[in-house]
């Protein structure tokens, strides 16, 4: 029942494994969304209690905030939630404060922490710098430098199951 390019594993077992992996990934996403919604609700309660937001349900005269025309792109880091903006300083609607600070056409700033990332000639270079906000924003660097989980057992490699330390000279 196995074809020549499957490595000896039958196709139905491969499909079943892929299906299980897809279902597991869906469940993980759903769990993450539930946790995120809890945090959003808690943040909305705090903002409402402090009077910084309209109504608790967010409907009191709330228009969806429109992105300024001089904002080229807003990037959001998946793990930390940090928002970084790439600004077009030559846009006619750009404020004078943005135009005065930039040497080149595209400026980068950390919207979450307020850090300035410099200016760039091309949007590609500005987007690259925005993705690496931990290099120029000290607060982003602190978020990205969180220590990873320590493994309590030796990692095994390959089909021989030898310890990695034995393989290194």
Image (cartoon, rainbow, N blue to C red):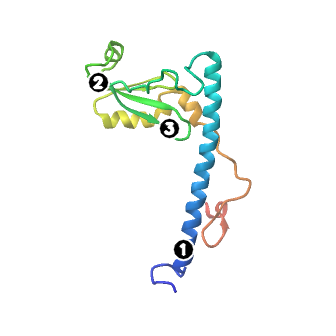
CA distance for labels 2 and 3: 25 Å
First in sequence: mark 1 vs mark 2: 1
- Specify whether 45 is left or right of 100: right
Question: Looking at the image, is mark 2 or mark 3 nearer the viewer?
Answer: 3
x 53%, y 82%: residue: 8
- Specify whether 147 is left or right of 63: right
To which quarter of the image does residue 74 belong? top left
- Tally the numbered discs: 3
First in sequence: mark 2 vs mark 3: 3
x 53%, y 72%: residue: 15
Q: Which residue is mark 2?
A: 104
Depth check: give the residue in front, 36 or 76: 36
x 63%, y 48%: residue: 31
Q: Mark number for residue 96?
A: none
Residue at the front extreme of this rendering: 60
Q: Mark number for residue 14?
A: 1
In the rendered image, the vertical position of residue 99 relative to residue 8, given as above or below? above
Q: Secondary structure at mark 3?
A: loop
In the rendered image, the vertical position of residue 159 relative to residue 95, given as above or below? below
Q: Position of residue 168 (x, y in %)?
A: 61, 60
Q: Secondary structure at mark 2?
A: loop
Q: Secondary structure at mark 1?
A: helix
Q: Position of residue 27 (x, y in %)?
A: 61, 54
Q: Mark number for residue 77?
A: 3
Q: Quadrant of the C terminus?
A: bottom right
Residue at the right extreme of this rendering: 152
- Do the CB atoms of the residues marked 1 and 2 lie less than 8 Å apart? no
């Amino acid at each position: 029942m196995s074809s020549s390019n499957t490595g000896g594993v039958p196709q139905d077992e491969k499909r079943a494994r892929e299906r299980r992996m897809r279902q597991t990934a869906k469940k993980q996403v759903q769990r993450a969304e539930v946790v995120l919604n809890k945090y959003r609700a808690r943040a909305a309660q705090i903002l409402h209690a402090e009077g910084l937001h309209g109504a608790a349900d967010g409907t009191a005269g709330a228009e969806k905030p429109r992105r300024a025309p001089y904002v080229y792109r807003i990037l959001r880091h998946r793990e930390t939630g940090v928002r970084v903006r790439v600004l077009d300083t030559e846009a006619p609607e750009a404020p004078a404060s943005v135009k005065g600070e930039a040497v080149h056409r595209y400026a980068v700033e950390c919207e979450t922490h307020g850090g300035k990332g410099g200016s760039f000639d091309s949007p590609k270079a500005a987007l690259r710098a925005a993705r690496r906000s931990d290099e120029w924003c000290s607060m982003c660097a602190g978020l990205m430098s969180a220590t990873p989980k320590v493994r309590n057992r030796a990692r095994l490699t390959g089909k021989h199951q030898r310890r990695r330390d034995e393989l290194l000279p």
